[in-house]
Image: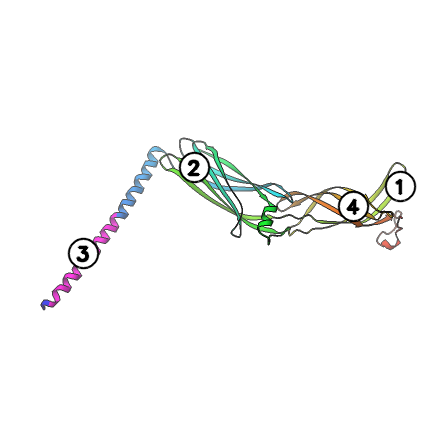
Amino acid sequence: MSSSDKPEEVVERDAKEKDDKNEEKGGFIEKVKDFIHDIGEKIEEAIGFGKPTADVTGIHIPKINLERADIVIDVLVTNPNPIPIPLVDIDYLIESDGRKLVSGLIPDAGTINAHGSETVKIPVSLIYDDIKNTYSDIKPGSIIPYKIKVNLIVDVPVFGRLTLPLEKTGEIPIPYKPDIDLDKIQFQSFSFEETVAVLHLKLDNKNDFDLGLNGLDYEVWLTDRKSTGYTMKGNIDVDTPFGAMKLPISKEGGTTRLKKDKGVGEDDDDDDDDEVYN
């Protein structure tokens, strides 16, 4: 072998020695990490401390109307430790398609008992005017997706302050009042004591979700000389996929027909034969 080959051999040997040292260093760091992890687990076992857990167990809408939706988020927090732990802060955010609808912070949110589980209720209100004024493409009557993000901050001995992040998705409506029309008033009887009539109403649901009618309260005023103009105001109680709602109904400047009830056994399908009261 010529003398010119020796420097190359030295360089190759030095590079190999450096690689071996790097591998030994990397392996040493991993061993230290594993050792620290093992020691941490043994300390947890010895002193009985562990990290708490949390889960969103339910989302309720106890009240919803044209102005707002009140939402309650149920979070089950489990404390495996032998002492109570304080729930320092609750940080929450509700967004739709990446756009913030509402956010807030609840400080000093309580204490989770030792070796126990507790459901923490987080109340949140969505004000529809704020949402519609901020995002013009969100229309009344629509259903929008939402994502709830919650950070629970707890203080645990040994671990210190920990953040427990939670997420939950769903849908929520932006309610809109239905249109109402008084098609006709059909009188059944007259007397000095009372007048009995049946109101034939038409309701037009403007929402992207079904309304199940449970009840109706209303007032009607006949407004012109022929008594065919009317104003009507009231509320309807409805069931929806999102819970019960009370929605207002109103109609001003409407016109209707006043009909005399037909006799028993007569067909009422042809309105042209009904007598109009003037």
Residue for point 29% across, 45% down? 33
Cα separation between marks 3 and 4: 96 Å
- The image quarter containing residue 159 is top left
* Residue under label 1: 190
- The residue type indicated by label 1 comes to Phe
* Residue under label 4: 231
* Residue under label 2: 154
**SS for tag 3?**
helix
- The residue type indicated by label 3 comes to Glu
Earlier in the chain: of badge 3 and badge 4, it is 3
Cα separation between marks 2 and 3: 49 Å
Q: Nearer the viewer, mark 4 or mark 1?
A: 4
**SS for tag 4?**
strand
Q: Nearer the viewer, mark 2 or mark 1?
A: 2
Q: Specify the label residue 17 is tagged with.
A: 3
**SS for tag 1?**
strand
Mark 1 and mark 3 in contact (Cβ < 8 Å)?
A: no
Q: Position of residue 114 (x, y in %)?
A: 43, 31
Could you tell me which quadrant the N terminus lies in? bottom left
**Which portion, as a residue range, is magenta?**
4-28
What predominant SS class does the magenta segment belong to?
helix
Residue for point 40% across, 33% down? 81
